[in-house]
Amino acid sequence: MRILLVDDEKNISNVLKAYLQQEGFQVTTAINGVIALTLFKENSYDLVLLDLMLPGLSGEEICKEIRKISAIPIIMLTAKVELEDRIQGFHLGADDYLSKPFSPREVVARVKAVLRRSSETSPLADLITYDNGITIDNSRHEILLHEEAVPLTPTEFKILGALAKYPGRVYSRGQLVEIVQGHDFGGDERVIDAHIKKLRQKLEKIPSQPKIVLTVYGVGYKFNPHQEE
C-alpha cells in the first residue's frame, strides 16, 4: 500500500513515515501543496495523509483538488480542534480527521481502518454499467459495449478497469504501467499509448475522436462515463 504524506513539519513527517514503514506501507512525503499535487498526479497512491496548515496551498485547497479527480481515502491532520473545523474537513471530502498532538500509533490504526473501509466499499463491484454503454463484468473478466461483448487482452482489461474505477481521474502513463506491469517495469512507458490506441479501436465509434477513453494532454488518460452525442 502506498501513502502520500503531506506535512511541512519534518519532525512529524519523519516519525509518521517511520511508523508507517514499520507496518509495511510505502510512504512518499511532500512539504507543500504544489509538490503534493504534482506527486499525486504522477503516481498511484492508496491513501493521503494531509496536514491542513501548510505554506502556500492550504490542506483544504489540496483536498478540493484531489476530490476533483479521485475518491482516494484522505485523512486530515491538523492543530485545529474546533468542531466546526472538523465538520468543514468532512464537507471537503475527508474520510477521517486527527487533531495534533496525536500518537503515531493512532495514526497507523486510523490508516488501517480507513483503508479497510475503503476496500469494503470499493466502487469496483462485480458488475458496473456506465452511461456511455460500457459494462465491466469483473467476475467474468468481460467488457460489454451496448450489451455486446468486446474481446480485450488481459492488459487492455486492466487498463480500462483502472481508468473506470475512478471516472474522471487522470492517470499518467507511469501510473498505468505500474498497474499493468508492477513496480519493476523497466521499459518505455509509451507502450501504454499503443494499448490505449487498441482500446479505442475496439470501443470508440470514431477512434480518432474518442469519447470514452480521453487524453489529457501533457498528463495522461481518463475514463469518461457519460454518454456523448
Image (cartoon, helix red, strand yellow):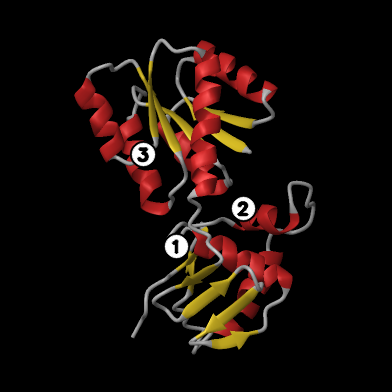
Q: Quadrant of residue 132?
A: bottom left
Residue to which mark 2 is pinned: 175
Q: State the residue in front, 118 or 30.
A: 118
Which residue is most to the left?
84
Residue to which mark 3 is pinned: 63
Report x, y in % for residue 37.
Answer: 45, 40
Q: State the residue in front, 60 or 93.
A: 93
40 to the left or right of 177: left
Tag 3: residue type?
Answer: Cys
Name which of mark 2 and mark 3 comes first in the sequence.
3
Report x, y in % for residue 122.
Answer: 50, 52
Q: Quadrant of residue 172?
A: bottom right
Tag 1: residue type?
Answer: Pro
Badge number at residue 191: none
In this picture, is 108 found above or below 129?
Answer: above
Residue 122 can be seen, yes or no:
yes
Tag 2: residue type?
Answer: Gln
Secondary structure type for disc 3: helix
| Number of other residues with Cα within 10 Å of mark 1, as a class: few under 14, some 14 to 19, many 20 or more | some
Residue to which mark 1 is pinned: 167
Q: Nearer the viewer, mark 2 or mark 1?
A: 1
Q: Measuring 47% from the left and 75% from the top, which residue is drawn there?
A: 212
In this picture, is 96 found above or below 43?
Answer: above
Picture quarter with the N terminus = top right
| Number of other residues with Cα within 10 Å of mark 2, as a class: few under 14, some 14 to 19, many 20 or more | many
Secondary structure type for disc 1: loop
Q: Measuring 55% from the left and 16% from the top, which residue is drawn there?
A: 105
